[in-house]
Image (cartoon, coloured by chain):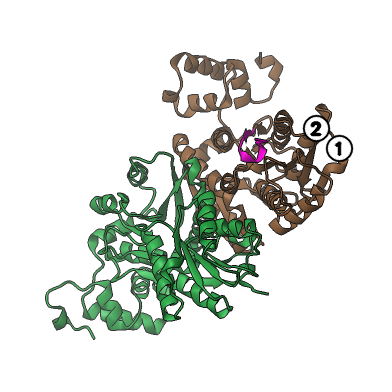
Chain colours: A brown, B green
Amino acid sequence: MVTMSSMGHRRATINDVARAANVSRQTVSNAVNRPDRVAPQTLQRVQLEIDRLAYRPSSAAKSLREQRAGAIGLELDARGGAAANAEIAYPFLSQLSLAARSHRCHVVTFGTDSPAPVTSGYESMVRAHLVDAFVLYGTHHGDPRPQWLTEQGIPFVTFGRVWDDPGFTAWGDVDGRIGTASAVRHVVDQGYRRVAFLGWPEGSAVGDDRYQGWREAASELGVLDDALVARTEQDLPRAQAAAADLLGSLQPGDAVVCVSDMVALGAWQAVVAAGLEPGRDIGLVGFDGTSTAGMFDLTTVVQPLAEIVEHLLTQIDVLLTDGEAPAEGALLAPTLRHAGSTRRR
Amino acid sequence: MVTMSSMGHRRATINDVARAANVSRQTVSNAVNRPDRVAPQTLQRVQLEIDRLAYRPSSAAKSLREQRAGAIGLELDARGGAAANAEIAYPFLSQLSLAARSHRCHVVTFGTDSPAPVTSGYESMVRAHLVDAFVLYGTHHGDPRPQWLTEQGIPFVTFGRVWDDPGFTAWGDVDGRIGTASAVRHVVDQGYRRVAFLGWPEGSAVGDDRYQGWREAASELGVLDDALVARTEQDLPRAQAAAADLLGSLQPGDAVVCVSDMVALGAWQAVVAAGLEPGRDIGLVGFDGTSTAGMFDLTTVVQPLAEIVEHLLTQIDVLLTDGEAPAEGALLAPTLRHAGSTRRR
């Protein structure tokens, strides 16, 4: 239990109140901003702790809240080639737009069509007071946006970890390790013997995470064979070529866990080109839950978009109420969608 | 030339001024709302005609403009299965978001996850005064949204024709006939002999339009054979099955023009499953310019999204300035993107 003395002279934060009242940060935020949304008994308990701890939402945050645009900004990549992201970006955006309503805000999109300077779109959105905060999508090593937004004091949350800044916590992400680990367990359950991994080149944070899940689960189940790892760019012909090579080390009854649906699609093509049948001969699992996976009847790891979106919107509420980041980011577990490509028949 | 007498007692409209000054509606709109954007000589000419014709933007539109949110609403389908639209919806939205900036507005998205009532999302956006107008996407036979918005007096434009209301003109659309006709001409140029069409079931407005383009061009080039038409739903396994049937009537050196990239992908799979090679043996053309077509090196009809978006944003400017719809909708010509699937080698 948090007491005034254990806190010393530090100002009480939303985290302190949440812990003391044994509720979530969101509930404290609601108790302050939308008491009608909180059950009477809970509201009473939270208000008691607010008084006892002398908790005050930071005045900067409060003044910001009073001038709120009630909107969240999301950058969309409008370069032609970026359409390859559409299958992930579109479901994320539509979920975000849907869930925003129950958080009493809306989503404002803005497009960028040049790779640099990537922050100009953000700057003009902020200058026009169109949004209170941003959701960043597609964070990656060397991404300049998190640091820039932090320096400007602009609230933001990210879908995906900020790989260059482990201290940043306002993120929600799919747990890639759990995803590929569940894929390995599923194919072993289905009776496939050996389990290969077709990944991206080492050094991509997301790809390395997914590789680790394969490695750990394969090791746990006693099927780890480091010779059964191949690497490819996120590109269909290259994935097909890499999978064709990998098939040279495999036999009917083996399976391939792939780092993405696109890579799995390349493997699918390689399997068919070798005169084999996905599922019956070679088990195949993709990652991302795209509609392309659905089209090809491909088992895939489905990103928990609704949960990620809910987490991000809640963090934005808290950031704007209190100015304080959560204690840690949220890794949300994906689910495996079973389909024909892992059915041995 | 429009004269006061030829207009009788009718109030002058933005069209009258545009015609009299020999400029576009957008230029008249700019002359009224953003004179700094108009070249001085043009501005003088337009202002002369505005005075001469006693043109006044409608007061309802003017009052609306003064309270403008400066935003356009766009509905996103957040139902799981709808992700199949992502490859077209995402590039459209990112282009719209990018171009909105130069029209001094922004895009607010909202999500729907139930098929009915489809208008509730629009209603809540309007009630909250979040947007001035909507862009409708995915209009289709029986779409209740255009009539509802018209009845409510809410300005909107559509990407796609309003098939049930030929009198509605505030639309921009891809010219499907030109698209499939150019596909037929291209495959004949490339030396393919017979040109089949793999379409959707009759009765879909977009599909019928694309079929007409195939038919007209094939007839013009003397290669029309009505026996070479097959139909399938927008679904990969069914498209593959329909293409496999169609291949029974074809020989190496023939080509198939498809109603969509997904249908073309089914044909691609059928060609490969028959031991043939797309391009070398059977020419294949898709429609929509999706990233999937790019992945499969598939020649495809690319939608002119930048032009459509510019047209729609201009129409919104005019609707909000003047309350008046354009004389007719805009059919914009797509372009063919040549790739390996129509290379005979």
Q: Give amino acid for label 2.
A: Ala
User: Which portion, as a residue range, is magenta?
Assistant: A334-345
The residue sitting at 36% across, 62% down in the picture is B316
Query: Percent x, y for residue A69?
Result: 47, 45
- Give the percent coordinates (x, y) of residue B2: 22, 83
In the displayed orientation, state which residue is furthest to the front: B248
Chain letter for the residue marked with disc 2 in the picture: A
- Label 1 residue SS: loop
Q: Earlier in the sequence, mark 1 or mark 2?
A: 2
Name the amino acid, label 1: Asp
Q: Secondary structure at mark 2?
A: helix
Asked if the residue under mark 2 is in contact with the one under mark 1, i.e. CB atoms within 8 Å, the reply is: yes
Question: Which residue is most to the left?
Answer: B9
Cα–Cα span, label 1 and label 2: 8 Å
Question: In the displayed structure, would residue A51 be above or below residue A144?
Answer: above
User: Dividing the picture into quarters, in which one does residue A178 lie?
Assistant: top right
Left or right for A147, reference B2: right
